Image: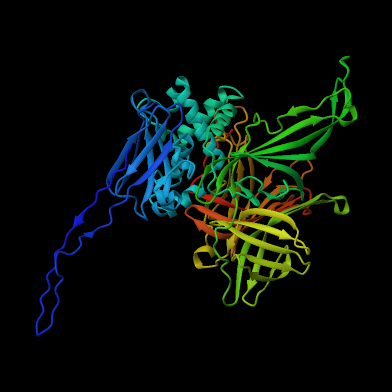
Amino acid sequence: MNRSYFVALIATFVSACGGGGGGSDYGGNPDPVVSTPPVSFVITGTVPAFLDQGTVISLSLSGETFSTTTDAQGRYELEVSGGIGESQFVVVTAQGQDSQDYIEFKSVLGQGSALKSLAGSDNTLTVDEYAATHISEMTTAAAGLAMIERNGVMAGSADTWRVAALNINAEELLIASSAMRLAIKDPDMRSVMIPDGTTTMDFTTSTEALHRAVEMMNAAGDSTRAEAKMETIQSAAAVKLQRPASLENIFIFEPGYRSSAYRFLSDGTGNRFTNSQNEVKEFVWRETEKTLELNYDNWVVDSNNVSIDIDGDGTEEEVYEEIVLTKTHLSFVSEQADYDVVNITDFFIKRYPNNADTLSEQPFDRNNDNNAGRGAKAFFASTGESFNQPQDGISEWILPIPGRWSEEYPDGRFYQLDVTFDFMIFESSFAGAGSEVGSFDWSVNSDGHLRFTTEQSRSFEYLPLADRIWGVIERDASDSIIGMNVTFGGQRDYDAANAGAFTPGVYTLEWSWLDDRNSQFWIEINEDGTARSVWTSDSNGDGVVTVSESEINTGTWRNEYEFLLIDFYRNNGPDNFDPCASAALEGCVIYNRRFWDIFAIDGDRYYVGHTHNFFDYLDDFQTRYIRDARYWVRLDEAPIELVED
C-alpha cells in the first residue's frame, strides 16, 4: 500500500498601512505559509497461516474505520491516514471471509503515544518492533479474557487495559488460544466450541464456552490438549519488547501457585529460587529467540523405595528410585502491559543409582501434563515508581520475603513453618521492624526502591512490578543475592471501609474454567457469627455434589480491628473427628485458625495477608504455620448447591 499525503498550501497576502509619517511595506507578495501535512501512521503485521488471503484487517478511531486485506503470505499493511492521536487506544481486528467468517481475531495494541514511540521516525510499526501486530488466537484470547474481567466490555484506555490484563490467568490465556486453534483446524470440535452464528470472539468472552472446550479436549484424549497448547506456543510471534537484552532477574508469579524467581549471570550460570523448602538451585542457561533453557546438575526432587522386576524373572525386588529435575524451558509467548506470559516446562527423569547397570534412566512426566507445562506471568524489572515513604509517623505494609520453610519435631511432635510475606512497620525516622525479619534501618535507593538492612546485616530490596505485586531481593553482608520472591503486597490502610470490610457472605478462591466445576472451595461467614468452610467434589461423577461428598468444617468468625479471624473446630476422637461448631462443645478442639489481614479491595476481590494456624485433632498443639498473600472473591451465595444425602 502506498502512503499518500495531503498538503494544503495557504497563501496569505498582507498589506500594511502606516500613518503619522511612519509605515512599512512588504514590497511584494509574501512567501506562502505551509501547514504541516497530517502524517499517516502505518501498521504492518501478519496473521496465522491458516487464515486465507483477503482477510480484512481494520481498526476504528474517532468514528472512522481504516481497513486493508492480507496477501497470500498472511501479511498486511494498514495505513491510518492523518495518524494516531497520543491518547487514542488502538485495537485491530482480523476478520475472516466466506467460509472463515466465524474467525474474528483481535489484538490490543494500546495507547497511541506508546505505539508512536515503538514505531520510531518512520511512523511504521512492525512485528519486529511489537509482536502484537501479529494478530492471532493468542492476542484474541488476551482481548477476550480481559473483556470477561470487565463484564464483556473492551478496555478503552491504557489504564483500564492494564488492570484487566493483570487479572488474566496465564494458563487460561494459553488454553483459550489452543482451543481456538483446535476448533479452526477440526470441524467437529468447531461445531460445538463455535456453533453457527458465533465467532471466535464470542467463544473467548464466554466462560461457559471455554469450560465446554476444556471438557471436549480432555475427552478427546490425554495428549489432545497438550499438543494443541504446544502448537500454539510454537506458532506465537517472538516477544522481545520487555525481555532485556541482558537478562538479570525474572520473577515468576501466578495466583494460586508457588512463586519462584531466577537470577541470571553473564557467565551463563544462574540460580533458581523456588521459595519452597529453602531451595536455591544453580543452573546453566542458554537463550533462543523464544525460549530460555535452564539445565540443572543432579537436582533430586524426590526419592523412594519401589518394587521392580529387575531381571524379568517375575519376582519384584525393592529398588531405590530417584526423580531428578534435569532442565526447565521458559517459553515467552505474549506481551502484556507489565509482564510477559511465559510457559514453564520442567523435565524429569527417573533413575536407579544403586542399579544403574540394569535399570536405565527414563523420562518421567511428573506433572501429568504431557510436558506441556503451565502458564505464568514473568516480570523483569520495576515499574519505575518510587516507594511511597511515610512522611510523618508510622506506615504499615504487607510485603513479600524470600520463603522461610522448616520442619521440626519439638518433643517428638511434627511442626512445619512456611512463610512468604511479613507484616512490617516503617517510621518516618527511617527505622522499622517486621515480625519475621526483625528490626531494620530503611532508605529509598537511587532507583526509587525501598531497601532496608536488618540487625543480621541482611538487606532486602523491593521492586514494584505491577499494581499490588512486589518483587524482593535478599542479600547477605557481602551483598551476594541469597533469596528472591514475588507476591501480592501493599500498604495497609485502616480507613473505615477496610476496618469493617468483611461482611457476611461467601468468600471463595476464584474458580477457573480450566477446572472441574464441581470441585470448588469457599468459606461462609454468617450474620449469627457462625462460619463454614467447604471443599466440594463429585466423587461418583453423577454431576450432583452431596454433603457427604464434601469436606465441611464449621466454626465461628469475628472482625478484630483490621483483620478477620475465623476458627474451625473438630472432635478430638479417637474414633470421631467430625466438625464441631465451637470449642465450647464437649470433645471439641480448634483445628484451624485463619487471620485475614486486608490491604486492598478491588471490586469483589479482597487482597489479604493470609495466615493459617493448624492444630492437632487430639489437642491444641500447633502443627503448621503458613503465611501467604492472596485474594478472595466475595459472592452473595455459594457457587454450588449441596444436596443432602
What is the count of numbered marks? 0
In this view of the protein, which residue sits in the foreground, 425 or 460?
A: 460
Residue 349 picture location, percent across and down = 76, 31
* Left or right: residue 246 compared with residue 360: left
Q: Would residue 202 be visible to someone looking at this image?
A: no
**What residue occupies the far top of the structure in this picture?**
313
**Residue 624: x and y, percent?**
75, 51
Q: Residue furthest front?
A: 27
The reply, left or right, for residue 25 in relation to residue 267 is left
612 over 24 or under it: above or below: above
Question: Which quadrant of the view contains residue 26?
Answer: bottom left
Q: How is the image coloured?
A: rainbow
Q: Position of residue 202 (x, y in %)?
A: 40, 34
Residue at horizontal 54 percent and vertical 45 percent from the top: 240
- Nearer the observer, 46 or 513: 46
- State the residue in front, 476 or 291: 291
Q: Is residue 440 visible?
A: yes
Residue drawn at x 82%, y 30% is: 351
Query: Where 208 falls versus 336 (above or below)?
Result: above
Q: Quadrant of residue 369?
A: top right
- Side of 354 relative to 132 (left or right): right
Looking at the image, is 28 positioned above or below residue 103?
below
Q: Residue furthest bottom?
A: 20
Q: Quadrant of the N terminus?
A: top left
Of the 4 image quadrants, the one containing the C terminus is top right
